[in-house]
Image: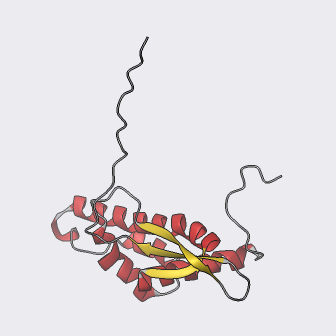
Amino acid sequence: MRHRKAGRKFKRTPEHRRMLLRNLATSLFEHERIETTQAKAKDLQPYAEKLITLAVRGLRRQKALGGEHADKMPLAEFRRSLTVLTRKDIAYKLFQEIAPRYLERPGGYSRIYKLAHRRQGDCSPMALIELIPADEPVRSKSVQPEVVGSA
């Protein structure tokens, strides 16, 4: 039974799965939009959003320190991101371009679109995962009108 077992195996060893997610996250931050299978996109989304949250918290911490530290790179968070991302230049992009966009956003930095076509070889359902633009407003939970019961 798979009760409370999160994540998919993708018929890979744990090391291979970790490397797959690292490479997908690196490509997502490089191109800001990638096309992959729906299952991989669903596993990638929380992985990538945690990295963006790490960078955003680091930038907020640096701004809170103020003074000469406000415009420097948050070193601890940058080094943690390097353990996950496969390229150093993409880690710089994460902290200098991507994270500053989302400083005022409480979460939800990416979205998944299901595509109509399937992959030619194995007929896998495909999806497009992309980073949300900075100027897009945050949707709040919809307020449902109160239902007045007739008693």
Outermost residue, front direction?
Answer: 150
Outermost residue, top direction?
Answer: 151
Between residues 12 and 128, which one lies in front from this camera angle? 128
Q: Position of residue 38 (x, y in %)?
A: 61, 72
Between residues 47 and 75, which one lies in front from this camera angle? 47
Quadrant placement of the C terminus: top left
What number of labels is visible?
0
Q: Give the colour scheme of this rendering.
A: secondary structure
Outermost residue, left direction?
Answer: 67
Q: Position of residue 128 (x, y in %)?
A: 51, 76
Please report the residue visible at 37 percent of the width from the left and 70 percent of the height from the top: 132
Q: Quadrant of residue 74?
A: bottom left
Q: Is residue 66 left or right of residue 24?
A: left
Q: Position of residue 50 (x, y in %)?
A: 48, 64
Question: In the rendered image of this protein, does residue 88 appear above or below residue 12?
Answer: below
Q: Is residue 100 left or right of residue 131?
A: left
Please report the residue visible at 58 percent of the width from the left and 80 percent of the height from the top: 36
Q: Quadrant of residue 52?
A: bottom left
Between residues 2 and 94, which one lies in front from this camera angle? 2
Question: In the rendered image of this protein, does residue 134 appear above or below residue 148?
Answer: below
Q: Position of residue 17 (x, y in %)?
A: 68, 75
Q: Is residue 50 left or right of residue 66?
A: right
Please report the residue visible at 31 percent of the width from the left and 75 percent of the height from the top: 73
Q: Is residue 103 left or right of residue 83?
A: left
Please report the residue visible at 51 percent of the width from the left and 77 percent of the height from the top: 25
Outermost residue, right direction?
Answer: 1
